[in-house]
Image: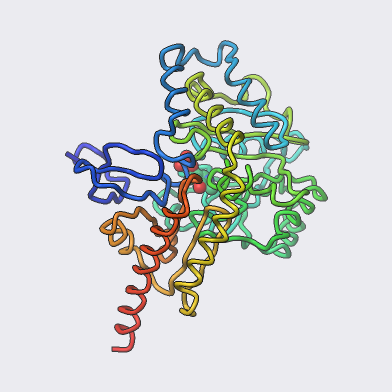
Amino acid sequence: MTESLMPTYGRLDIAFTRGEGVWLYDDNDEAYLDALSGIAVCNLGHCHPAVSRAISEQANTLIHTSNIYQVPLQSELATKLTQLSGMSQAFFCNSGAEANEAAIKIARKYGHSKGIDKPVIIVMDNSFHGRTMATLTATGNAKVHAGFEPLLPGFVRVPYNDVDALKMAISHWPEAVAVMLEPVQGEGGIKVPDSDYLDEVRSLCTKAKLLMMLDEVQTGIGRTGNWFAYQQTENALPDVLMLAKGLGNGIPIGACLVSGPAVGILEPGNHGSTFGGNPLVCRAALTVLNTIESSSLLSHVTLMNEQIMAAFKHALGHIEQVQIRSKGFMFGIELPIGCTELVQQALDKRVLINVTADKVIRLLPPLILTADEANKMVSTVSELILTFMAENTVESVA
Ligand SMILES: *Cc1c(COP(=O)(O)O)cnc(C)c1O
């Protein structure tokens, strides 16, 4: 069955047949708590009724026309996103990598407009930006690069959450045109920077006339308890904002938004996408945004974060080697050693989790997670960790 598929993924041996809210069901109708949301995609849970209804209505009305014509739903979605984000304009594509590709093209053209022939984009260690050639080059992970060299020129890398290193890179690279980063590193292991980091990056970029390009593909659309993670402070509005994952709750859509000096860089003929922003995906995304807006989900995320963190600290706080990090509904529990086997063990307990960066248990539950569901998530994951730590401590002594 799987031999005709390229083996690009290490898949678990399970398939789901339907989903509802935070629950996925296998073909025996066994329920699994999805504490991953299809990797930060199904923020409203599976098959949210409003989203499914909108998709079905739109599928029976108009799915695709192409960007040769006006697409009113695309304009409507752009207006909604600019209102929520404070950005000025949007371009629509189909994935996170494509949103970042658009950003990289904007940065390079911005450089050329300033007479910089070989523009340089400053990117971060331990980052993740996608799997296309430009975005894997931007990604700070040797495993993602391996086998695909030569990488693209025009990228330099600095440590994340290190303002001095960024300052030095900016003064060292007169060709620098942009800084590209995640507000919280997701794939990198839920790395949460200091609370003033984004503000500092913003002011360095403004001073040096560099574009601040925020990859909110994972952190955006309510995941951190704000619409966008940069909104946690007053002064971190980026020049370029990249979105995807949660935007369509499972319908593939990405967006690249611009403000300030990034407006007007791309001109007719510079960029495009055949599928990008078609009526079907825009209708889905508009419904996602309107549903979140008319709910109290953002404050729910902030409130539940506190309860979940308190519960994890209660269960695991006594183990010194275990670090617990979070922002909103992004949780990372770092163990001292690789722990990828916990994914299967959690699956056996009917909870879907992920391990990233080899030793960080990553939880990205749907924003609709209730207190009861949170308790199940925390107790299952904590028990697995306690057992794992006990067994591995014994082993290291033996
Ligand atoms: C998932 C992710 C991407 C890539 O998105 P795709 O839709 O898989 O191309 C880019 N950046 C970040 C921060 C991500 O989490």
The answer to which image quadrant residue 259 occupies is: top right
Q: Is residue 132 visible?
A: no
What count of labels does the image hold?
Answer: 0
Q: Is residue 62 left or right of residue 5?
A: right
The answer to which image quadrant residue 100 occupies is: top right
Q: Is residue 288 visible?
A: yes
Q: Quadrant of the N terminus?
A: top left
Q: 78 above or below 179?
A: above
The residue positioned 51% from the left and 15% from the top of the image is 66
List the single residue furthest toward the right.
Answer: 207
Q: Is residue 141 left or right of residue 261?
A: left
Q: Is residue 242 left or right of residue 344?
A: right
Q: Nearer the viewer, residue 117 or 301?
A: 301
The residue positioned 49% from the left and 35% from the top of the image is 95
The residue positioned 29% from the left and 83% from the top of the image is 395
Residue 219: horizontal and vertical position, in percent?
57, 47
